[in-house]
Image (cartoon, grey):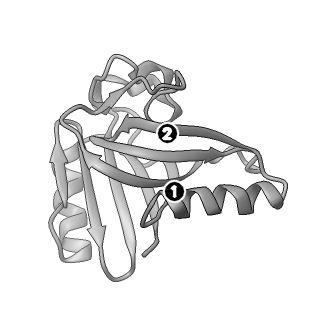
Amino acid sequence: MSRVQLALNVDDLDEAVAFYSRLFGTEPAKRRPGYANFAITEPPLKLVLLENPGQGGSLNHLGVEVADVDTVDSEQARLADAGLASIDERGTTCCYAKQDKFWVEGAPNGERWEIYTVLADSQTFSAESPQGTVCCGNENSADAKPASTAASRR
């Protein structure tokens, strides 16, 4: 199963969670300080809310959540064959989950896309990956603070 991920910056997490819970008729699948995500069945969507006061209403990043590492690998190969470069992140901790993923480079308007699978839950928002990159491509989150402390990220 694959689903599109939409990660939004929000000014007030509680207010955003209340709104999106009503909009999609479901509660968050995960809720942590400065962070919430919804695993919406219909339409298939992973909605991620990152509390970033002063950045509310703006796009943080986009993604495609896939079922497993093999799918991450096959999508990365497919996109490379199509001429799109990527930045590999394996065994990284991001958004309270250990993940294998890559970031697609070269979007025409600078939007950021990740293709990822969740390997395990994590109690920390982020941690520096073995490749030296950090959650959501944000160097400011290397110290594993929740998103609300990294308002300058975008």
Label total for image: 2
Which of the 4 image quadrants contains residue 5?
A: bottom left
- Return the mark for residue 63: 1
The image shows residue 130 at horizontal and vertical percentages of 48, 25
The image shows residue 64 at horizontal and vertical percentages of 51, 61
Which of the 4 image quadrants contains residue 97?
A: top left
Q: Is residue 4 left or right of residue 123?
A: right
Q: Which residue is mark 2?
A: 90
- Return the mark for residue 97: none
Q: Which amino acid, by three-letter code, is at mark 2?
A: Arg
* Depth order, front residue of 76/21: 76
Residue at (19%, 61%) from the top-left corner?
29
Q: In this view, which residue lies farthest toward the front?
A: 70
Residue at (23%, 37%) from the top-left corner?
34
Residues packed near mark 2 inside 10 Å, few (<14), some (14 to 19) or many (20 plus): some
Q: Is residue 26 left or right of residue 137?
A: left
The image shows residue 127 at horizontal and vertical percentages of 35, 25
Residue at (23%, 31%) from the top-left corner?
124
Q: Which amino acid, by three-letter code, is at mark 1?
A: Gly
Residue at (54%, 26%) from the top-left corner?
131
> Which element type, helix, strand or loop, lies under badge 1?
strand
* Depth order, front residue of 65/18: 65
* Depth order, front residue of 54/66: 66
Viewer-nearest of discs 1 and 2: 2
Query: Could you tell me how far apart the alpha carbons at marks 1 and 2 are, in whole angstroms?
Result: 16 Å
Res. 59 in view: no
